[in-house]
Image: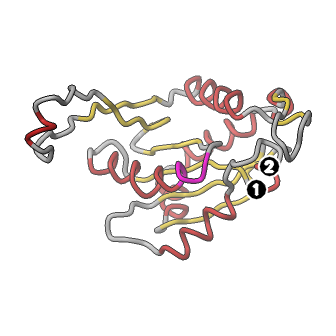
Amino acid sequence: MIVAGIYSFKGGKEIVENEYAVEMAEIKQIIAAINPDEHRTKISKEKTMPGRMLYNPRSLNGAMKHEFVASGWQNYRVACEYSTDYYTAEYHSTSPQITAYREMDFIKNRLGVEVQFGKYAFMVYNVCAKMTIFHNLGMIAVGVEIVPVKAFAKVISTGVSYFEQFVWDLQQRGVADIDIPVMILGITGK
């Protein structure tokens, strides 16, 4: 696979290139190590492309995970302690204990990486919420979000979001004080 697009959100590209050059070189090697043809295993049952052979997002994610872990990147989970202070009295007495967590795909030397071959909402959540949370917890200083470009998303499955849409939305949204620097990478097959 190759990096087909790069977008700098809040100066993320510049910070990653200047302060995390070794990690960025690893990320590029990881992306290049994945042969997308090995993951073209999903037979579409979708109305718009029945029977068509598509890239399997779970298989692509698994390949990414394998490569990142082999390079010493670690997955991090943080337990969530949800407050019950906001429940009504009627509900509070019957509410079950909730156990949950937030997870960052990969972290190394305070650089957080999320790989997203899923729905659009997850891309926005990763950059505009999750990375900020992990930054506030002291786990990361800056982030990298890896997503498919439009041409690649079209052959993954319907509903998969893509780099160009994500960049446009981030540009229209603007940057908030709580946002952290993130480099957005748009990837595709070779």
Image quadrant assignment for residue 78: top left
Image quadrant assignment for residue 43: top right
Q: Is residue 156 left or right of residue 114?
A: right
Residue under the image location 16 percent in, 40 percent down: 83
| Dominant SS in magenta | helix
The residue most toward the front is: 90
Name the front one of labels 2 and 1. 2
Residue under the image location 82 percent in, 34 percent down: 45
Q: Are marks 2 and 1 in contact (CB under 8 Å)?
A: yes
**Residue 24 at x, y = what percent?**
58, 47
The residue most toward the left is: 89
Quadrant containing the C terminus in the rendered view: top right
Q: Is residue 46 left or right of residue 90?
A: right
Q: Is residue 146 left or right of residue 86?
A: right
Q: Which residue is mark 2?
A: 152
Which amino acid is tagged 1? Ala
Residue 120: say if magenta.
Answer: yes
Residue 138: say if magenta.
Answer: no
**Residue 132 at x, y = what percent?**
36, 54
Q: Which residue is mark 1?
A: 4
Segment tinted magenta in the rendering: 119-123
Image quadrant assignment for residue 115: top right
Mark 1 lies on a secondary structure that is strand
**Residue 131 at x, y = what percent?**
40, 50
Assess disc 2: are there few (<14), some (14-19) or many (≥20) residues with their C-alpha within 10 Å of its C-alpha. Answer: some
Which amino acid is tagged 2? Phe
